[in-house]
Amino acid sequence: MEKVISGIRPTGNLHLGNYFGAVKSFVTMQNEYDCMFFIADWHSLTTHPTPENIRQSVRTILSEYLACGIDPEKAPIYVQSDVKPVLELYLYLNMNAYLGELERVTSFKEKARTQPDNVNAGLLTYPTLMAADVLAHKADKVPVGKDQEQNMEMMRLFARRFNRIYNVDFFKEPQSYHFYKDAVKVPGLDGSGKMGKSNGNCIYLCDDEATIRKKVMKAVTDSGPTQLNQEKPEVIQNLFTLLELVSTKDTYDYFNDQYNQMTVRYGDLKKQLAADINAFCAPIRERILEYQSNEDYILRVAKQGAERASESAEKTLREVRQIIGFRA
Ligand code: TRP
């Protein structure tokens, strides 16, 4: 079975956009591939989180991903910093990663521009650590968003370069798995095209019913259709896209017909949408709360994940050491 690995950057709670964008694909992939998922807490150090930030986000991510259906028996989930051999590979790869090429990475240039007083070496070598994450397991596929394409190219470059320098056929070039092609782009509630934390237009999977209702009722609309069967402007299309994701086809058709007849009442539509989003989120939310109150279980999952990942990484590293000329 092909090996799949992906890192999760700790960026706060999961929202519907994350769910339909990536998490749902992970849940499907765990049945089709030999998957491992990990929390990229080493990577997160580039932004200097506090120890409490780190501990908290690890707990949050674990409980939310498990609540969404990641099954740790099928797909181990671990914390990056629990798997030390990756760090060793990071060092080896860094010896053959060149300043010029690292400086040319767009996300590095962007960070260097937006946070000029924190252009640290970790930021510069972000792509080498990411390469080590994946190459340590000789994974075949990496599910990533479009924004990670350049990091994936660097990963393949480092793999090829290692093989060439040591004249071996050791690392394979991991391929990007473009789940975003069939992922649904979830619109925001502010009329913008995309639900995203930075836009403040999100519904989080852990939001309670009252919060969901409040957010949906505040969603941007217009003053209503002025022609029969008219095309929907973006703000309205967004609400219909959300209905499509969480409501039944009957509900969608009902409001769609009303829109086409110009009899739609946005207040009713929103009430229904809020109820359906809540019905969708409620079981996930309950599981999140359950996992959060069962820290022992969460820690056990992470520990088992770390054991499996360490075993796999250590096996690769033993060979890497020998290739380089160190004792295995
Ligand atoms: N860079 C990824 C992101 O920002 C997170 C990540 C770290 C990752 N290491 C990885 C993804 C290895 C895939 C494979 O989302």
Image (cartoon, grey):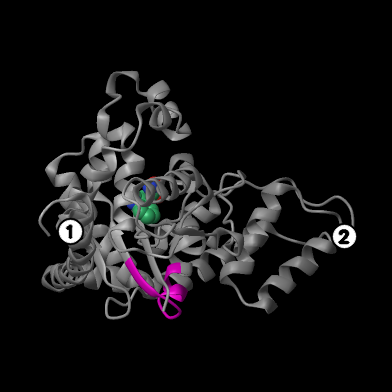
Q: Going by the image, does 251 lie left or right of 152? A: right
Q: Quadrant of the N terminus?
A: bottom left
* CA neighbours of label 1 inside 10 A, class few (<14), some (14 to 19), many (20+): many
Q: Amino acid at mark 2?
A: Asn
Mark 1 and mark 2: Cα distance apart in space: 57 Å
Most extreme residue toward the right is: 228
> Which residue is at the front of the view, 150 or 193?
150
Residue 23 visible within the image: yes
What residue did someone put label 2 on? 229
The x, y position of residue 191, in whole percent, is 62, 45
Residue 83 is marked as: 1
Query: Magenta residues?
Result: 26-36
The x, y position of residue 148, in whole percent, is 47, 47
Most extreme residue toward the top is: 117
- Label located before the other in sequence (1 or 2): 1
Element type at mark 2: loop
